[in-house]
Image (cartoon, rainbow, N blue to C red):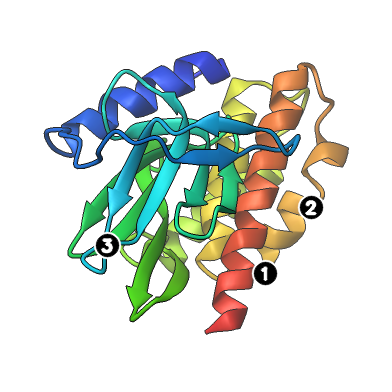
Amino acid sequence: MRIKTKNQMKKYILFIIILFGVLTSNAQKTNCECIVHDAKKVKADSIYTFSNGKSIAICGYREGNPNIFSEFYLNRCDMDSSLGFWDALRDCKVTLENDTLIIREFKLIANSPNQDLIVNVWTIEKFYFEGNKLKMKTLINPDIKLYTKTETNKILERYELAKGELDEDKMLLANQLFVAMISGSNDAFKYFKNFEKKFSLADGYFKEELDDLENMYLVWLKYKLSK
């Protein structure tokens, strides 16, 4: 069944995250504060303390489970400095594992065996210390399933035959073109760039979903170019 609203998508993603394992918080309460976008400070929800005694605080919205956050800030407590903001469109599992703070972002990606949407870990961000120096690393989940050439050709053919207004079925096609793009298809890239011209936009939500896919592709491209 297609997810038709962002609220439905968020609930579905959060449900699936739970299936990835039992969620137990490994953070502690603290008086450390976070610097938010208007330069104000808010009390941290929890902190994550490393073996060198230094801590990173998290401030934001829990999504009903101790490790799941959306629309949150990270702050380095010993230097009172912000490490960034993760917006409301991102649903993340935050854990401290082997002295590394790991943020796993979850996305619906059309890479099931029949090219339907399923929940994937999309990006993995790592924060760790080497001595007193904080290191940060972001990577695309290397285990994301890509399309074979046969699967890609099937999606390209679907696009070529499709007509009419943008609807739920065509939005699934847009998601499939995204997977074809990151699988290396130049034709899929051209088709995706022409998507809004080929189909009339009937719903503002579809535009937001297309923008999200484009942003995901830019993240993918930036990561690949950096390797």
Using the image as rendered, state which of residue 146 and residue 128 is in the foreground: 128
Reading the image, the residue beneath label 2 is: 193
Mark 3 — residue?
53
* Residue at point 42%, 35% (across, down): 117
First reached walking from the N terminus: tag 2 or tag 1: 1
Q: Earlier in the sequence, mark 1 or mark 3?
A: 3
- The amino acid beneath tag 3 is Gly
Q: Amino acid at mark 2?
A: Lys
Q: CA distance from mark 1 to mark 3?
A: 49 Å
Determine the secondary structure under disc 3.
loop
In percent of width and height, residue 153 lies at 53, 59
Give how far apart the Cα atoms at labels 3 and 2 are: 48 Å
Q: Is residue 193 above or below residue 47?
A: below
The relative height of residue 188 versus residue 41 in the rendered view (above or below) is below
Q: Which residue occupies 72% across, 40% down?
A: 211
Q: Quadrant of residue 39?
A: top right
Residue count near mark 2 (Cα–Cα under 10 Å), binned few <14, some 14–19, many ≥20: few
Residue 2 seen by the camera: no
Camera-nearest residue between 41 and 159: 41
- Residue that mark 1 sits on: 186
Mark 1 secondary-structure assignment: helix
* Mark in front: 3 vs 2: 3
**Label 3 environment density (alpha carbons within 10 Å; few <14, some 14–19, many ≥20):** few
Residue 109 percent across, percent down from the top left: 45, 43
